[in-house]
């Protein structure tokens, strides 16, 4: 099977390494020629428990990929705001299945327009930090949870069920929408606050004032998505803060590194859903505008 992974950030490198380590033939597509050159020379490295493992993989720039060939599985591991441009590039390819690995749910709004036979989505619960163009630090073992949006020939299941590794557990879920919503609640409560305040995740539960701020955000998010057990969900959000206490959220890292964030796919998506429900979300709107102001301050309004 031909598996193409588009995106060479922390998640793209992590997934590439573990799929390649299970004898899958991977082609990693990245934007930059210099990254292609260094991965060809050094392979993809994963640092885990102070030890480094290496896998050799095929790598190409995104623009040099041969998109006229059949691709059994396309794994899209780019930022949510890059998904549309990736799909425009590969529209002529014979893609049998796609697995999307994005934060938020903004990308789900285009699913109905895709003619790909098999679509799946995934949630990455591992801790991963890219150290350089070819090395990712696997900072915490979690799970890859995934689910079909629509199933055809079962390509995604065939590939993922073969990954049996205590360092990279994979679990199939039945309800893709609920799975993504659960991650969305966590991302919406943690990412924008930590990015604006520039604090690590654990600070949100250490400080009474930060905790109160997060609870206000949580209440608005739940009013949009609904929840059968608010108390358990709130406990889970706090648990994630505690478990990742020393981590910086992806949005915090993006702001620090002068990169565009996924605010639109997380908070913007919630605001759009609230608008459909004829609800106004003042706190979520405040967070959205605050992050957008940070982005514009750093590199202008390119929305």
Image (spheres, grey):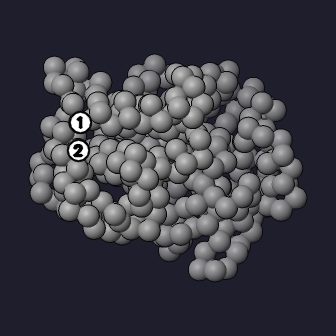
- Secondary structure type for disc 2: helix
Q: Quadrant of residue 249?
A: bottom left
Residue 189's x, y, as percent? 29, 48
> Label 1 crowding class (10 Å Cα cut-off): few <14, some 14-19, many 20+?
some
Q: Quadrant of residue 52?
A: bottom right
Marks 2 and 1, Cα distance to the nearest angstrom? 6 Å
Relative height, residue 162 to residue 122 (above, below):
below
Residue 62's x, y, as percent? 74, 35
The answer to whether the residue labelled 2 contacts the one labelled 1, judged by CB atoms less than 8 Å apart, is: yes
- Residue named by callout 2: 217
Q: Quadrant of residue 180?
A: top left
The residue at 18%/25% (across/down) is 280
Between 127 and 74, the one lying in front of the other is: 127
- As drawn, which residue projects farthest toward the bottom? 50
- Residue named by callout 1: 283
Residue 90's mark? Answer: none
For the question of whether residue 23 can be seen, the reply is: no
Between 97 and 197, the one lying in front of the other is: 197
Instruction: Using residue 56 as the reference point, say whether residue 93 is left or right of it.
Output: left
- Secondary structure type for disc 1: helix
The residue at 79%/61% (across/down) is 43
For the question of whether residue 280 can be seen, the reply is: yes
Instruction: Using residue 34 as the reference point, say whether residue 241 is left or right of it.
Output: left
> Label 2 crowding class (10 Å Cα cut-off): few <14, some 14-19, many 20+?
many
The residue at 34%/51% (across/down) is 190
Q: Earlier in the sequence, mark 2 or mark 1?
A: 2
Residue 199's x, y, as percent? 41, 58
Between 297 and 73, the one lying in front of the other is: 297
Relative height, residue 54 to residue 193 (above, below):
below
Between 269 and 289, the one lying in front of the other is: 289
The residue at 19%/54% (across/down) is 212
């Amino acid at each position: 099977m031909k598996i193409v992974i588009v995106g060479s950030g922390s998640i793209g490198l992590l997934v590439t390494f573990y799929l390649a380590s299970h004898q899958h033939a991977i082609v990693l597509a990245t934007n930059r020629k210099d990254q292609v050159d260094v991965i060809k020379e050094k392979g993809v490295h994963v640092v885990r428990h102070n030890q480094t493992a290496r896998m050799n993989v095929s790598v190409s720039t995104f623009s040099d990929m041969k998109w006229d060939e059949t691709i059994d599985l396309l794994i899209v591991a780019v930022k949510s705001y890059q998904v549309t441009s990736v799909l425009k590039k590969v529209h002529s390819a014979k893609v049998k299945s796609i697995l999307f690995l994005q934060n938020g749910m903004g990308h789900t709004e285009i699913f109905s327009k895709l003619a790909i036979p098999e679509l799946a989505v995934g949630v990455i619960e591992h801790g991963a930090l890219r150290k350089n163009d070819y090395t990712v630090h696997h900072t915490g073992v979690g799970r890859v949870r995934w689910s079909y949006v629509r199933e055809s020939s079962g390509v995604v299941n065939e590939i993922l069920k073969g990954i049996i590794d205590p360092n990279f557990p994979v679990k199939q879920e039945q309800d893709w929408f609920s799975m993504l919503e659960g991650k969305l609640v966590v991302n919406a409560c943690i990412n924008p606050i930590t990015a604006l305040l520039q604090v690590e995740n654990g600070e949100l539960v250490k400080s009474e004032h930060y905790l109160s701020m997060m609870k206000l955000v949580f209440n608005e998010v739940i009013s949009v998505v609904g929840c059968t057990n608010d108390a358990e969900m709130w406990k889970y959000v706090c648990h994630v803060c505690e478990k990742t206490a020393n981590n910086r959220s992806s949005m915090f890292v993006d702001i620090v590194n002068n990169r565009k964030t996924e605010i639109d796919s997380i908070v913007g998506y919630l605001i759009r859903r609230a608008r459909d429900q004829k609800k106004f979300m003042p706190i979520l709107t405040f967070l959205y505008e605050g992050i957008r102001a940070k982005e514009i301050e750093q590199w202008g309004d390119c929305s």
